Image (cartoon, helix red, strand yellow):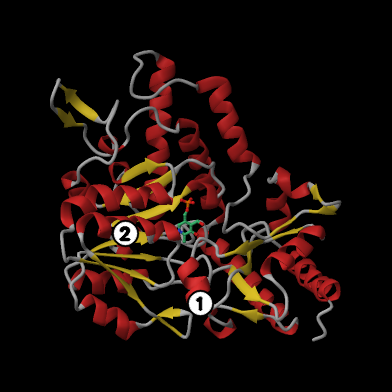
């Protein structure tokens, strides 16, 4: 069913604001999504009526807050096809979730000379924690190469798997190329090679149906703020036996069963990984965000973004810019993220001129410096990205603004 975009837009207060004297055209949802009033209201209601610390009080307010926090995890677990709320650990973000695995799982399972395999299309949050682990342990960090600057090269991936890495970590969807990786197939191959698998789902969960039981990864991480929820709340899904065997990442209140002067024992899942007071309002907001997306239907969300992306690829092609990532014929393997470049125009100039027309896009290396600077061979690229509230007319506005870039910078073709 097509999304009722005009109705959806009315739920997002920021979309009726003006920037630089022009109606805001927000094309940077890959960085962070905007928030509907349902999420804003849920957070505000929590503060106004339900605020108390969780797990601690024996009074009703605290018990209700605890129940809502658990309900949030149950809602998230059902949304992504996880077995139970016990498999859902809340951290600050995808970044913190990956750091937790690299530290807590990595330190116990990766040793000198062992291999860690990632890919050339990763975000820094799925590179740097593995570099740090490799340095701590004397392990080797390998990268699966890209084919045509778009997809993971299958032969190279197989060859790197043959070196029997301890862990394979890859993005489900690239935040620069928009490439959708075949997460289930890559997980199966990595498991056959004896590796543990972590998937960075930051750009996938907000935009398409995700069923973790079909994908089969050991760990899967994503961020609330990219899927209509608040900042400061991210999810680490983990398979139960792995989480059970894993040491905690943080120590402190609530994650313990008992504490003595020298030793402590750990709480049950998922609390063992959540030390100290948690982002309770973030969990409440994330639950509201998931309910909002569920009501729209993730198949419909994906279809809407596919249509917008196809349209934008056509229009950008007509405007004569170079687009990175899968082309229109490969749309089934492409999400609503389009990085591009324009001859004789610096990425930052493009973003600045579009901003003057009310169009918000991101420009830079998108926290994927190896990919942007070494594979795309650019110091920076502009990127537009779409979500449930974007329209064809907004893409027209953005492409028309690219005309202004040519005018201002006196680019002839
Ligand atoms: N992974 C990918 C593919 C991303 O696009 C991002 C954010 O842009 C992240 C990880 C990091 O997300 P966060 O900043 O919420 O930790």
Quickly name the residue at label 1. Answer: 332
Q: Quadrant of residue 42?
A: top right
Q: Position of residue 89 (x, y in %)?
A: 34, 43
Q: CA distance from mark 1 to mark 2?
A: 30 Å
Q: Position of residue 29 (x, y in %)?
A: 60, 57
Between 229 and 211, the residue placed more toward the observer is 229
- Could you tell me which secondary element the residue under label 2 belongs to? helix
Quadrant, the C terminus: bottom right
Residue 169 vs residue 369: left or right? left
Disc 2 packing (10 Å; few <14; some 14–19; many ≥20): many
Vertical placement of residue 397 versus 263, above or below: below
Q: Mark 1: which secondary structure?
A: helix
- 333 on left or right of 269: right
Residue in the picture at 58% in, 21% down = 48
Q: Residue at x 35, y 52 (%)?
A: 98
Q: Give the x, y percent position of residue 350.
A: 73, 68
Q: Which of the marked residues, 1 or 2, is nearer the chain's N terminus? A: 2
The dot on residue 130 is: 2
């Amino acid at each position: 069913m097509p999304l009722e975009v005009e109705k959806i837009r009315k739920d997002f207060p920021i979309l009726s604001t003006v920037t630089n004297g022009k109606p805001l055209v927000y094309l940077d949802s890959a960085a962070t999504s905007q928030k509907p009033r349902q999420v804003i209201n849920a957070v505000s209601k929590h503060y106004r009526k339900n605020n108390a610390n969780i797990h601690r009080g024996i009074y009703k307010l605290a018990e209700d807050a605890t129940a809502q926090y658990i309900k949030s995890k149950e809602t998230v677990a059902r949304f992504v096809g996880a077995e139970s709320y016990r498999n859902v650990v809340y951290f600050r973000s995808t970044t913190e979730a990956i750091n937790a695995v690299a530290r807590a799982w990595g330190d116990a399972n990766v040793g000198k000379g062992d291999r860690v395999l990632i890919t050339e299309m990763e975000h820094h949050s799925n590179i740097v924690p593995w570099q740090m682990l490799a340095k701590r342990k004397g392990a080797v960090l390998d990268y699966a190469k890209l084919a045509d600057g778009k997809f993971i090269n299958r032969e190279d991936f197989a060859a790197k798997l043959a070196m029997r890495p301890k862990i394979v970590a890859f993005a489900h969807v690239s935040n620069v190329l928009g490439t959708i990786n075949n997460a289930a197939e890559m997980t199966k191959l990595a498991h056959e090679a004896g590796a543990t698998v972590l998937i960075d789902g930051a750009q996938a969960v907000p935009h398409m149906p995700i069923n973790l039981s079909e994908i089969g990864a050991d760990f899967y991480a994503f961020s609330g703020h990219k899927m209509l929820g608040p900042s400061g709340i991210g999810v680490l899904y983990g398979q139960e036996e792995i989480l059970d065997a894993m040491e905690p990442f943080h120590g402190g209140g609530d994650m313990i069963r008992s504490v003595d002067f020298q030793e402590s024992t750990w709480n049950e899942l998922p609390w063992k990984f959540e030390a100290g007071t948690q982002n309770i309002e973030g969990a409440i907001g994330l639950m509201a965000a998931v309910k909002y997306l569920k009501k729209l239907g993730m198949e419909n969300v994906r279809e809407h973004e596919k249509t917008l992306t196809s349209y934008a690829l056509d229009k950008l092609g007509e405007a004569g810019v170079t687009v990175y990532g899968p082309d229109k014929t490969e749309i089934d393997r492409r999400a609503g993220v389009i990085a591009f470049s324009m001859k004789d125009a610096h990425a930052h100039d493009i973003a600045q001129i579009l901003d003057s027309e009310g169009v918000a896009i991101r420009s830079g290396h998108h926290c994927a410096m190896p990919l942007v600077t070494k594979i795309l061979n650019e110091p920076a690229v502009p990127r537009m990205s779409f979500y449930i509230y974007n329209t064809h007319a907004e893409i027209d506005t953005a492409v028309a603004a690219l005309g202004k870039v040519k005018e201002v910078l006196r680019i002839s073709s």
